[in-house]
Image (cartoon, rainbow, N blue to C red):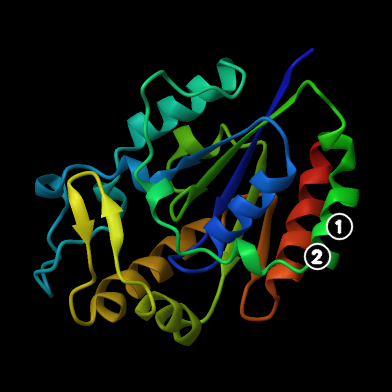
Amino acid sequence: MVKVYTIGIGGPSCSGKTTVTRILRQILKNTAVIYQDDYYKPEVEVPIDETTQLANWDCPESVDFKQFAEKIKYARTHEGKLPEGFESNEESNVHDGSNLLSPEAAEKLKQILEPFVKDPEAIFVIVDGFMLYWDQGVSEQLDCKITFTASFETLKMRRDKRQGYHTLEGYWADPPQYFEKIVWPEYLRLNRHNATVNDVLMVNTDENSIDETALKVANKLCEML
């Protein structure tokens, strides 16, 4: 009997979500990925921050949670498949560190996840996003909940290294001080809510390497067995 497992990987921008998502996809068979970043509203509907007058892409009002939740539900009920014709803009964003996983850690991951890998009827839907646990319609569909954290200094350094992001309508590059004025304050606000969600594995990616983070996530997945 086919079993669909939904895995939520949340955390602020540049905390390592997509790195671990793509590491898992390399190991687990029959895997679909749904990125929250594909469900931003059109730019004209993104709220303008009153203080900075910058578009606030990091608040809940900027995301179409209804469509986001519907895609997860569709994948759950269609054996991990996404609707025909669906294309992800986020797949074009290649700033992740999945190629930095050591061969030793990759081998350990395969050993930990072996029960899933050997099960031909196991299907995985990985949901990657910075507000996974804000909306109940999204959060309640996740069988396994994981979130990453990191310091202001680490996240800003990683974000500053990025050129920009592919979006629904083109390409986005951060205006000056966008991280300090929008991204970080919104993360702090949302993180207070995340702390109220039950049974979430929290991993600090300041304190844990890519290898260590991936192994902790793999052990958490095994709780679904």
Is 196 situated above or below 91?
below
Q: Is residue 219 visible?
A: yes
Please, what secondary structure does the residue beneath circle 2 have?
A: helix
Circle on res. 170:
none
Q: Residue 68's spot in the image, x, y percent?
A: 39, 34
User: Looking at the picture, which amino acid does disc 2 mark?
Assistant: Pro
> How far, Cα to Cα, is label 2 from label 1?
6 Å
CB contact under 8 Å: marks 2 and 1 = yes
Between 70 and 75, the one lying in front of the other is 75
| 1 lies left or right of 123 | right
Please, what secondary structure does the residue beneath circle 1 have?
A: helix
Q: Residue furthest bottom?
A: 153
| 17 lies left or right of 67 | right
Q: Residue at x 8, y 69 (%)?
A: 53
User: Looking at the picture, which amino acid does disc 1 mark?
Assistant: Glu
Between 136 and 99, the one lying in front of the other is 99
Q: Residue at x 38, y 39 (%)?
A: 88
The residue at which mark 1 appears reads as 107
The residue at which mark 2 appears reads as 103
